[in-house]
Image (tube, rainbow, N blue to C red):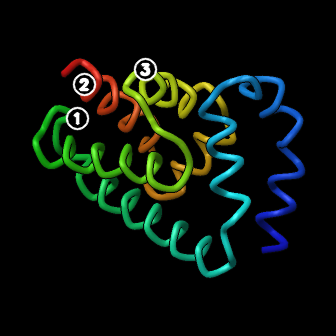
């Protein structure tokens, strides 16, 4: 919990400046403020599982059924634990995965190039 709270404090000002006036930000703040250490452990484990599954499927096309199902799982994960992730938000989030080195490095720890792969898969997902 100390690590999570430290990260929230570190990026809170930036997040408020970028998204503070959005319903998604407000919803995320409300939801995450109620999570226990056990909740965060579960959320982190679930996210890692999705990233690992996506990394395993990187040899496939981002358009493949398997990859698209995993991308849907990722979108639902975000909606369940953070905020209602519309396709518009999801598309923009995919762009952030490669434009912000912090996101890129975090995601790429599960597989080199995973952030770019996810961006492409999210782009295909949002076309539907």
**Disc 1 to disc 3, C-alpha distance:** 18 Å
**Disc 2 to disc 3, C-alpha distance:** 12 Å
Q: Secondary structure at mark 1?
A: loop
Q: Is residue 108 left or right of residue 19?
A: left
State the image coordinates of residue 99 (x, y, percent, origin top left).
60, 25
The numbered mark at residue 124 is 2
Crowding near the residue tagged with mark 1, few <14, some 14–19, many ≥20 C-alpha atoms within 10 Å: many
Q: Quadrant of the N terminus?
A: bottom right
**Disc 1 to disc 2, C-alpha distance:** 7 Å
Q: Earlier in the sequence, mark 2 or mark 3?
A: 3
Marks 1/3 in contact by CB < 8 Å: the verdict is no
Quarter of the image where one finds residue 101: top right
- Above or below, 17 against 11 in this view is above
Crowding near the residue tagged with mark 2, few <14, some 14–19, many ≥20 C-alpha atoms within 10 Å: some
Marks 2/3 in contact by CB < 8 Å: the verdict is no
At 32% from the left edge and 23% from the top edge, which residue is drawn? 123
Q: Is residue 112 left or right of residue 56?
A: right
Q: Secondary structure at mark 3?
A: helix
State the image coordinates of residue 15 (x, y, percent, origin top left).
78, 34
- Above or below, 109 against 117 in this view is below
Quarter of the image where one finds residue 116: top left
Q: Earlier in the sequence, mark 1 or mark 3?
A: 1
At 29% from the left edge and 23% from the top edge, which residue is drawn? 126
Identify residue for label 1: 62
The numbered mark at residue 88 is 3
Q: Nearer the viewer, mark 2 or mark 3?
A: 3
Q: Earlier in the sequence, mark 1 or mark 2?
A: 1
Marks 1/2 in contact by CB < 8 Å: the verdict is yes
At 47% from the left edge and 48% from the top edge, which residue is drawn? 78
Q: Secondary structure at mark 2?
A: helix
């Amino acid at each position: 919990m100390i690590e999570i709270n430290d990260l929230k404090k570190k990026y809170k000002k930036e997040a408020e400046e970028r998204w503070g006036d959005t319903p998604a930000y407000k919803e995320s703040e409300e939801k995450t403020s109620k999570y226990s250490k056990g909740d965060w452990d579960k959320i982190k484990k679930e996210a890692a599982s999705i990233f690992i599954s996506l990394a395993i499927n990187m040899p496939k096309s981002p358009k493949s059924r398997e990859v698209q199902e995993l991308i849907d799982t990722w979108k639902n994960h975000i909606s369940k634990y953070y905020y209602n992730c519309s396709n518009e938000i999801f598309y923009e989030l995919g762009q952030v995965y490669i434009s912000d080195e912090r996101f890129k490095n975090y995601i790429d720890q599960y597989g080199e190039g995973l952030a770019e792969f996810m961006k492409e898969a999210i782009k295909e997902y949002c076309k539907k």
